[in-house]
Image (cartoon, rainbow, N blue to C red):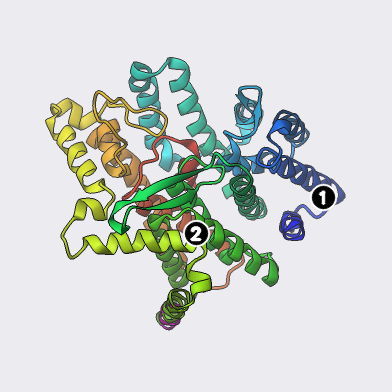
Amino acid sequence: MNKIIVDLGSRLNVRGNNTLRGRIFDAVFLLGFLCCLIPGPLPDLTSYASVILILCIAVCFFDENFYLYTALFMYMRYRMLLGDTPVFRIYSYMVVLRFLLDLPKTKFRMAYFPALFVFMLHSLFAMPQLESYRVGLNVIVDCALAYIILLKIIDNPGLFRKFIYAFLLGGVASGIYGWTNTDVSVDINVAGAGAQTVNRNFGALSDSNFAGLFYSICIVSAIAVKGIPKWLRAAALVLFGIMLVQTASISALMILAVLLTLYIILKFRMKSIIILTAVFVAAAVAVVVILTTPQLREIEAISGLIIRINEKLSYIPRGRWDLLTTDRYDIWTEAMGIFFSKGIIGQLIGGSVITVMAIDYSVISIACHNSYIQALLNFGVLGTLLIYIPLFGVFVYRILRHFSKTGGYETEDLKILQLIFNFAFIVFGFTVDFFIDWAFMIFYFI
């Protein structure tokens, strides 16, 4: 495992930074990554690891690797703590300072300004009604920082590829945290499967479905990104595959299937029909082997996933769409009822506070589990359009631009991954809500 982590980390030293100075900053970043492995197995050393991580960030302040720590914090922001203060909060202040220093030469991406404007209005006027102005300011600042950081990454192919490597390393850190910390899993009762209990591990993230989304993207990224040796790529796929199964997230398995399908179409184009057929057959054979091999079927994580899938299948002939969707159907119905009960102003501009960070329980008793409905309640019809029209517009533009080029161009892997990240945000939003959490907005702004 250590060899795999070190070799994957060594991929950070890509073309464009292959100098002594570049290798030093890569080594400093890898030291910061190793600090993120400490809180799980050695929680008493978290503060010491956090101090070292802060020092690593400070050393990289004027180097491009400074922005790579964002990928680690997408997983570890609530785990790397200095007392009660997240290291990410200190990092965010440093990003603001770096942005101000680089402001004269910063090129902005105007397409996302409408969304940022909507988020700012909600954070400053709606959020403080439930929380405080400090929380509202933190939310919009973090969201803006995600946008700013990606400004620096997207236009630099070498740095962008390193960001994907760092994202994979962050996934490794999350997995290790999940395997060594007893407080990051939850047992759920599966009544439709005979009142059996299934354990769901969400690693360093806050929810099994969120973890499943991140690990699914890690799997596709490990397949798509250039520069990783074949054996290491295979090891990464096994590692993230195990972590994904341990989340017992059916939604995550579905999003993985969708993302892999999109990747194959983007990568292989006209050959994709043959390849997709072969992948489908291979997947079907794998399922049969697992179901007919007790040694595999009885592995705890696989068994839990089988229990959940069997439970869902049992609801279809009974027409229980509410139970099939884990009560999401009822939640969506309630949320839309709340939306239509608002006056015209409320429907147009929203104003509710139903976010990942805070929920106004006087409006609804549970999260919407659908980002589109969540957007309607929070931002109204106008705000929702201002958020999603740029996203869909950029996505379609990138699709058309991708197919206008001959395959195999140098940055093809990065362009495909941009589409994968965007598509994950678009599709997964039908089953979960993640506004306005900056880590998920990375998938939006990228």
Picture residue at 38% right of the left edge, 27% below the top: 358
Q: Earlier in the sequence, mark 2 or mark 1?
A: 1
Q: Nearer the viewer, residue 407 or 52?
A: 52
The numbered mark at residue 23 is: 1
Q: Which residues are magenta?
A: 274-280
Q: Secondary structure at mark 1?
A: helix
Judge left or right: residue 72 versus residue 59: left
Q: Which numbered disc, 2 or 1, marks the residue closer to the eye?
A: 2
Dividing the picture into quadrants, the one containing residue 338 is top left
> Above or below — where is 114 with respect to 324?
above
- Circles 2 and 1: CB distance less than 8 Å? no
Quadrant of the image occupied by residue 45: top right
- Residue placed most toward the observer, 71 or 268: 71
Q: Name the amino acid type tagged 2.
A: Ala
Helix, strand or loop under label 2: helix
Quarter of image, res 274: bottom left
| Mark 1, other Cα within 10 Å: few <14 / some 14–19 / many ≥20 | some
Q: CA distance from mark 2 to mark 1?
A: 39 Å
Q: Main secondary structure of the magenta part?
A: helix
Residue 12 can be seen in this image: yes
245 left or right of 157 in image: left
Callout 1, which amino acid?
A: Arg
Q: Is residue 326 left or right of residue 214?
A: left
Q: Quadrant of the N terminus?
A: bottom right
Determine which residue is flagged by label 2.
301
Place of residue 363 in the rendered image (x, y in percent of width and height, measured from the top left): 24, 26
Picture coordinates of residue 62, whole percent (x, y): 74, 35
